[in-house]
Amino acid sequence: MTMLKEGRPTAPVAVADAHMAPATVTGNRALMLEEALIFEIGSTDTTGVDFAPAPKVASRLAGLERRAIGLPGLSEQETVRHYTRLSRQNYAIDLGLFPLGSCTMKHNPRLNEKVARMPGFADLHPLAPQSTVQGALAVIHELAEWLVTLTGMHSVAMSPKAGAHGELCGLLAIRAALEARGDARSVVLVPESAHGTNPATAAFCGYKVEDIPATPEGRVDLAALTARLGPDVAAVMITNPNTCGLFERDLKTISDAVHAAGAFVYCDGANFNAIVGRVRPGDLGVDAMHINLHKTFSTPHGGGGPGSGPVVLSAALAPYAPLPFVEKQGDTFVLIEEESAQDHHAGTFGRMVAFHGQMGMFTRALAYIMSHGADGLRQVAEDAVLNANYILRSLDDVLDAPFGDSGPCMHEALFSDRGLADGFTTLDIAKGLIDEGFHPMTMYFPLVVHGAMLVEPTETESKAALDQFIMALRSLAHRAKAGDEALKGAPYHAPRRRLDETLAARKPVLTWEAPTLAQAAE
Ligand SMILES: *Cc1c(COP(=O)(O)O)cnc(C)c1O
């Protein structure tokens, strides 16, 4: 394998490791090819295209200073191979089960892709006159109606571009509503088990964040929460189902108490996949909730593309929703870009985005929703929960399930590192999974569980796929409990061995610099 020394490739170095065959001369592993950076394989003297500048361009360039900017040139074949090799080092939902808890890595139906690529949607320009994009505005409007219906809420802000952006939207609306009644408050309450974006969003909006503890059963401590409510609390941010994979049964009671104290309820809706079609957050007293279209509604995410995080709002918050929004006026769809005193968004806090750049996610999500229908979506939630419980009960004899006694889980199964042999950790199991051909599960989150392993299979996996994954995880659990030292060296079969994660996080090397002549001579 090629060792990178100060960002520079050296000759392949044999790694002394009893569990591994000697390193190859090339650094390649079977048909997985080692690939250097494009700057290392390209040269400014090479090019994949070969034509003289058009005369007009040449005359325009006359008199301008021209100098090389050092971009690497490659032949066409080298270019194609470079990106194909890199793509093969990636893991994707199209390759196998992607058990990342809280991320809802489900299959992206190809029907969605077909719809999103229709030229009338794919070739839109954001500044096209509204009369020429009525179909696109109709899609946004229809999707908005579905989201409002499925959540039982009053309205929806479609412009946020991801879950975290949706949280920002929700808290800005809450702040605008509080300020409109002359009641600026300073504190946002967040359960200990919350996703990191929740406290980060609240802090970003200038609020002081206070933790609410969890009960031993893994749910929000109702008594602690209600005891903390008071005139300084602006909002409570709750995830339901929560990140321990459990339904917050007290949410309605919590909402009533929060409202009685003059505050708002923000619900992190990232886990909506577990309840879509079965539970309407509006019935639970939620004031604002983001929906990750790229989780629940199957639009690609991660390396697969941008996200989209519409925020459904209660009647109390609707007037403060951001611009722009789509309104149906008679038979015409209108994109409202400016606030006006008459309309129902009179208190809008302003604008979060320049354009609806996530239009491709809207078309995909609407295609997904319409192809499933309301009954199909309900079955999505039921099957997602069934699959997660199958994993929970197929592994809870070999892995500690901290809330396994709290009854069935929702759409994700949570395990801890309790019971592993001394010195063995969640990280060892995660790295071992890579050698077994699976992307690791979510690790060390939620923070309320030591060495957490959060597994979310989603409804789109077959029983055969689940069984294979369970088999791999059972084997790894046995090895970690038996103290199999080899596991600590995993992964052995990946393009890179175990990396120094602390160094990678604290001192990432994100730029490439040409080696100096002295280095090159070394
Ligand atoms: C994914 C997720 C978020 C953030 O959503 P993004 O779309 O990644 O910004 C927030 N909360 C939870 C629980 C999540 O799983």
Image: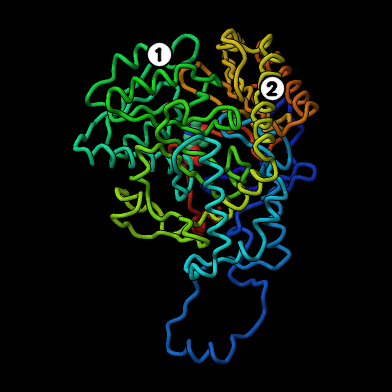
- Which percent across, then down, holds residue 292? 53, 40
Q: Residue at x 35, y 49 (%)?
A: 344
What residue did someone put label 1 on?
221
Q: On the picture, is 151 further left or further right than 460? A: left
Q: Is mark 1 within 8 Å of ligand 1?
A: no
Q: On the picture, is 404 further left or further right than 206? A: right
User: Does dot 1 land on a helix, a strand or a loop?
Assistant: loop
| Foreground of the two, 85 or 204 | 204
- Which percent across, then down, holds residue 190? 37, 25
Question: Mark 1 to mark 2: distance in Å?
Answer: 27 Å
Q: Residue at x 47, y 15 (%)?
A: 219
Q: Residue at x 57, y 15 (%)?
A: 417
| Foreground of the two, 239 or 376 | 376
Q: Residues within 10 Å of mark 1 (few under 14, many from 20)?
A: some
Image mark for residue 386 = 2
Image mark for residue 5 = none
User: Does dot 2 land on a helix, a strand or a loop?
Assistant: helix
153 to 389, vertically: above or below: below
Q: Amino acid at mark 1?
A: Asp
| Foreground of the two, 441 or 28 | 441
- Which percent across, then down, holds residue 503? 47, 35
Q: Amino acid at mark 2?
A: Leu
Can the viewer see residue 482 in this picture?
no
Closer to the chain start, of discs 1 and 2, is 1
- Which percent across, then down, holds residue 337? 38, 60
Q: On the picture, is 474 further left or further right than 180? A: right
455 to 88, vertically: above or below: above
